[in-house]
Image (spheres, rainbow, N blue to C red):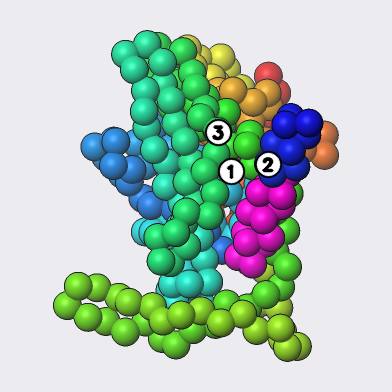
Amino acid sequence: MKKYILLLVLFFSVQGFCQDLNQYQYAVVPAKYDFLKEKDKYRLNTLTKLLMEKYGFKSYLTTDVQPDEIANTNCNKVFVDVIENGTMFVTKLKVVLKDCKNNILFTSDEGTSREKEFGAGFNEALRNAFKSFDTLNHQYNGAVLKQEPVIATEKGAVPKEPVILNENFETPKPTETKEVTTDVFFFAQPTANGFQIVNSAPKVIMRLFTTSQKDVFIAKGDTAQGVVIFKNNQWVFEYYDNGKLVSELLKLKF
C-alpha cells in the first residue's frame, strides 16, 4: 500500500512540474558555468541550448541577441543551470530550471560518465542528465506570462509579479528557419575523436566531434559552429546565423 501511495505522490509531483513548465516557451542558458573557467568550455553551454530546444524550448545563450519579448522581461522564461558534483573518476552533472524569482521548477536526475577525457565526460554526463526531461513531455500551452518592463536598480533588474493571461492572444511566431541545399559532395575522414570534412581541393572545411548519441556530431566549421545530425535519411548541419536557425544539407561520403 505504501508503494502505491509513493507512486501516486511521484506521479502527481511530475504532473505538477509539467504543468508549470508548460507555461514557459523560452529558456536562457548561461554562456559560462561556474565549475568551468571559460565561456562555453567543451561546447557544454551550446550543447545545453540544443538539448533544451530538443525538449521544446526556444533557447538562447546569455550572449545571444535576443528578441525584445525575451530581453525586456524576466518572468516569461526559465533560467537553466548545470551543477557539477563529480569526483576524480566520475563526472556528475545535474540540470536545474528556475523561474525569475529563483524558485526551482525542475531538477534532473544526476547524469554520470566515467570517460577520462574531460570534454567527452562532460558531454556524456550532460546528455544522461537530460534523459530526465523525457518524463516532462514539455509542450508550451500558449499561456502569456506578462509583466511590467524590468525596473533597473543599483542591485540590478527586479521584475514585477507575473500575471497569467487566459484571454485570446496571438501566439508569437517561431524562429525563422533558413534551409540551404547543395549538390557538392564532401568526404568524411576519421580522426581521433570524430571526423574531418574535406572538399575536392582537398581542404578541411569542418571538424566533427563524436557524442554519446549515434549520428549526432558537434560540428566546428570555418564560419559557424553547431551540430551535424542524420535525419530524414540525410546529413544536416544546423547552426544559428544572426538569431535564425539554419539547416544546411550536407552530402557526406564516409
Rendered residue at 72%/49% (across/down) = 12
First reached walking from the N terminus: tag 3 or tag 1 = 1
Whether residue 12 is visible to the viewer of this picture, yes or no, is yes
Amino acid at dot 3 = Asp
Per the image, is 13 magenta?
yes
Identity, as a three-letter code, of the amino acid under mark 1: Leu
Q: Quadrant of residue 144?
A: bottom right
Q: Residue at x 44, y 59 (%)?
A: 103
Instruction: Report x, y in % for residue 250.
Output: 68, 38
**Which numbered tag is attached to residue 51?**
1
The relative height of residue 85 versus residue 101 in the rendered view (above or below) is above
Neighbour tally class for label 2: few under 14, some 14-19, many 20 plus, Cα within 10 Å: few
41 and 189: which is toward the camera: 41
Stretch in magenta: 11-24
Secondary element type, mark 2: helix
Between marks 2 and 1 in the image, the one whose residue lies nearer the viewer: 2
Query: Which of the two residues, 99 or 249, is positioned nearer the viewer here?
Result: 99
Do tag 2 and tag 3 residues touch (Cβ < 8 Å)? Answer: no
Q: Identify which residue is drawn at 42% across, 41% down.
A: 82
- In the displayed structure, 128 sits above or below 21; it is above
- Residue 153 image-quadrant placement: bottom left
In percent of width and height, residue 66 lies at 46, 69
Q: Which mark is residue 10?
A: 2
